Amino acid sequence: MGGVINRTLETHRERRIANYGTFRLLLFGLDEAGKTSILNYIKTNDCGHTEPTALFNVESLSLSGSLNVSVRDFGGRAEYRGQWVRSITGGDAVLYVVDSSDTQRIEESKLELEKLLDSIISVKIPLLILANKQDLPTALSEDEMKKLFVTQLLKQKDRLSGVYPISAVSGNGINELIVDMKRYFKSI
Ligand SMILES: Nc1nc2c(ncn2[C@@H]2O[C@H](COP(=O)(O)OP(=O)(O)OP(=O)(O)O)[C@@H](O)[C@H]2O)c(=O)[nH]1
Ligand SMILES: [Mg+2]
């Protein structure tokens, strides 16, 4: 039964992409992880000033002028997290943002990702973990973040997945992320 539902979802997604040529990115992660700042940077080359996001906001943009994406930037506060799982089936990729400098909340962040994983795997969409705030001296390195999230990444073995060290303040790493996303979306 689950297989039939998943195949139907897959067909819906393929039709939607073929008809509209737009990919839906879902930005999840704890509050303060930097989701809205990353979205701002992708839009304007500046992370700007942000306020905590309530529920989610949607932005349509073009990545490097050639790939249309609609980004859903979700609120990360505990009271808004119930919305995440309900939104997975409408997405084409999950960008899971982690504040790499906030070691006290890494376990909480892993726990929230675990809750999402079954849905991500069953709808067969990529999972990119964005290790944000790399500009801060206390940020865990790419290797440290890979080790911490190894179990979650291994579960995604037949789909695009990985850890991307980035900073929404300096913009470092964001271009590499966009290049990989473009390559992936062009391949499907
Ligand atoms: N140093 C540094 N600060 C960052 C970075 N990205 C975001 N911030 C700061 O982190 C704080 C939270 O950023 P937001 O983008 O609002 O976080 P969010 O994940 O959207 O938070 P919610 O909407 O509550 O879920 C802000 O003060 C940002 O300026 C980064 O890469 N480096
Ligand atoms: Mg936000």
Image: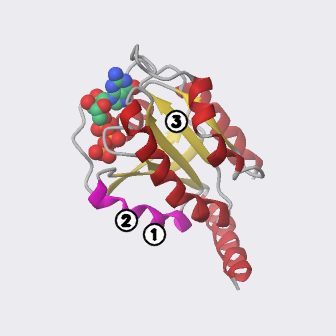
Q: Which residues are magenta?
A: 78-90
Residue behind mark 1: 86
Residue 51 position (above or below residue 83): above
Residue behind mark 3: 130
Kindly report the distance in space between the C-alpha atoms of the residues bearing marks 3 and 1: 21 Å
Name of the residue lying farthest toward the bottom: 1
Residue 183 position (above or below residue 171): below
Please state if 73 lies on the left or on the right of 188 as rendered.
left
Name of the residue lying farthest toward the top: 137
Badge 3 residue CB within 8 Å of ligand 1: no
Q: Secondary structure at mark 1?
A: helix
**Residue 134: horizontal and vertical position, in percent?**
46, 21
Give the amino acid type for the residue marked by disc 3 in the picture: Leu
Give the amino acid type for the residue marked by disc 2 in the picture: Gly
Residue behind mark 2: 82
**Residue 132: horizontal and vertical position, in percent?**
45, 30
**Residue 184: horizontal and vertical position, in percent?**
71, 44
